[in-house]
């Protein structure tokens, strides 16, 4: 009897090891797929002063973007992740070349909050992997430069200076802006002005208070009075309507607040991320990839947004690490793995269709562009999530 039980336990453990190995092989296969697709994209890049940005549905041709645009840091960021995965010096040298293009716009005057996206994904990953002091200097300058957009009377950053006049949005803060607090937290920890930490903390706190509806879904834009800090209204720019849940906005909220919790330890930020995640998971379709807006009127005949799925998958892997409760940790990791399984399926991977990693993203539906497209930031967060998945499978830290 006893020996039967031991045999059963032995076979069960063998089965578990086998499952872990299979999971790791799948993650590696998906990362190898990213390497193969990016290799093909590199062959298509003839102008080395612009970055691959998006591919329209039905096309195989990349649209490129100039250094300084909000999406320009994602391609260099992908190259750094490819270098991290492969250890191949060719990817490092490509990453260095494209990152060098970003430095002037990262360190020049900030025209919007997007300095955070464009510098932290490119130069930030470069610094993490190389410790190059020039990268450190550039990141510190980028953080100082973006800090001029902070408005103490409101307690948030002005996201879009160009919308002040154009839309009459005196002081506007978008949920995406949470993502860029990571650069400020980093700078404050790495020799920058300590006020950067205070600004980022206050921005997160004000956003937590004003951006969320009682059910945990968030507005895209909050318009504040620029002198009194009074909340004027919550509106959308890229979602379906002011009151709806724009998928990528919700993804930025989840990712942004779990990062803010990691950096501050403020439990309210964890709770905010958790509530934003709950409603997101409850309302997802069966394949774990949202429609571009959860309240778009023609669902299921609406385009998906695989970029939101990739951002949330990466964020939930971090939540699985930071969760104190084991059950919660497991639930977040399971949900993230399901998202990555779906994104890695024949339906969402680009494979022979084009040379991006993923299909079926929506960039700006109300303005009618990048609908059902491949978009560079979806690829960036997909490979980031796969690397996090690999590190977790191997029992390593996701942060190194
Ligand atoms: N940050 C702009 C967007 O998510 O489309």
Image (cartoon, rainbow, N blue to C red):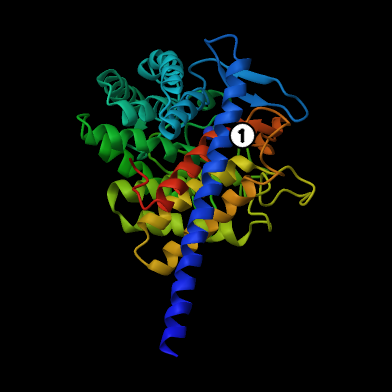
Rendered-image quadrant of the C terminus: top left
Where is residue 8 shown, x and y percent of the image?
A: 48, 78
- Ligand 1: image quarter: top right
Closer to the camera in the image, 109 or 394:
394
Q: Could you tell me if residue 160 is visible in this image? A: no
* Residue in the image at 67% along x and 54% along y: 287
Residue 241: image quadrant is: top right
Q: Is residue 350 left or right of residue 271?
A: right
Q: Is residue 397 left or right of residue 246?
A: left
Residue found at x 30% / y 38%: 185
**Residue 1 rendering spot, x and y as whole percentages:** 45, 90
How packed mark 1 is, by other alpha carbons closer than 10 Å (few <14, some 14-19, many 20 or more), is many
Numbered marks: total: 1
Say which of 155 and 118 sits in front: 118
- Image-based side of 374 in relation to 72, left or right: right
Q: Position of residue 43 (x, y in %)?
A: 61, 16
Q: Which residue is mark 1?
A: 357
């Amino acid at each position: 009897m006893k020996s039967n039980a031991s045999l059963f336990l032995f076979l069960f453990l063998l089965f578990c090891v086998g499952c872990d190995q299979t999971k790791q092989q799948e993650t590696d296969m998906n990362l190898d797929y990213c390497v193969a697709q990016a290799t093909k994209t590199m062959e298509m890049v003839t102008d080395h002063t612009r970055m691959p940005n998006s591919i329209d549905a039905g096309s195989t041709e990349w649209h490129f973007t100039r250094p300084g645009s909000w999406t320009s840091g994602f391609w260099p960021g992908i190259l750094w992740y490819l270098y991290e995965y492969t250890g191949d010096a060719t990817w490092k040298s490509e990453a260095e070349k494209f990152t060098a293009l970003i430095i002037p716009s990262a360190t020049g005057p900030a025209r919007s909050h997007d300095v955070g996206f464009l510098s932290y994904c490119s130069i930030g990953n470069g610094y993490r992997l190389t410790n190059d002091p020039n990268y450190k200097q550039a990141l510190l300058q980028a953080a100082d430069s973006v800090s001029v957009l902070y408005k103490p009377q409101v307690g948030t950053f002005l996201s879009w200076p160009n919308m002040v006049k154009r839309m009459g949005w005196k002081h506007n803060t978008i949920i995406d802006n949470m993502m860029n607090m990571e650069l400020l937290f980093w700078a404050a920890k790495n020799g920058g002005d300590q006020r950067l930490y205070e600004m980022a903390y206050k921005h997160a706190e004000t956003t937590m208070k004003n951006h969320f509806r009682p059910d945990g879904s968030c507005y895209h834009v909050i318009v504040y009075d620029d002198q009194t800090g009074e909340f004027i209204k919550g509106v959308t720019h890229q979602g379906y309507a002011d009151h709806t849940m724009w998928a990528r906005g919700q993804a930025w909220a989840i990712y942004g607040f779990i990062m803010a919790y990691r950096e501050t330890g403020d439990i309210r930020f964890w709770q905010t991320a958790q509530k934003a995640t709950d409603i997101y998971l409850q309302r997802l379709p069966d394949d774990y990839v949202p429609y571009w807006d959860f309240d778009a009127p023609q669902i299921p005949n609406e385009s998906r947004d695989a970029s939101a799925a990739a951002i949330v998958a990466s964020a939930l892997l971090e939540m699985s690490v930071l969760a104190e409760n084991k059950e919660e940790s497991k639930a977040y990791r399971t949900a993230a793995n399901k998202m990555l399984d779906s994104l890695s399926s024949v339906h969402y991977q680009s494979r022979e269709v084009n040379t991006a990693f993923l299909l079926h993203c929506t960039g700006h539906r109300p303005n009618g562009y990048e609908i059902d497209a491949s978009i560079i930031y979806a690829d960036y967060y997909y490979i980031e999530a796969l690397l996090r998945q690999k590190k977790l499978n191997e029992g390593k830290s996701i942060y190194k």
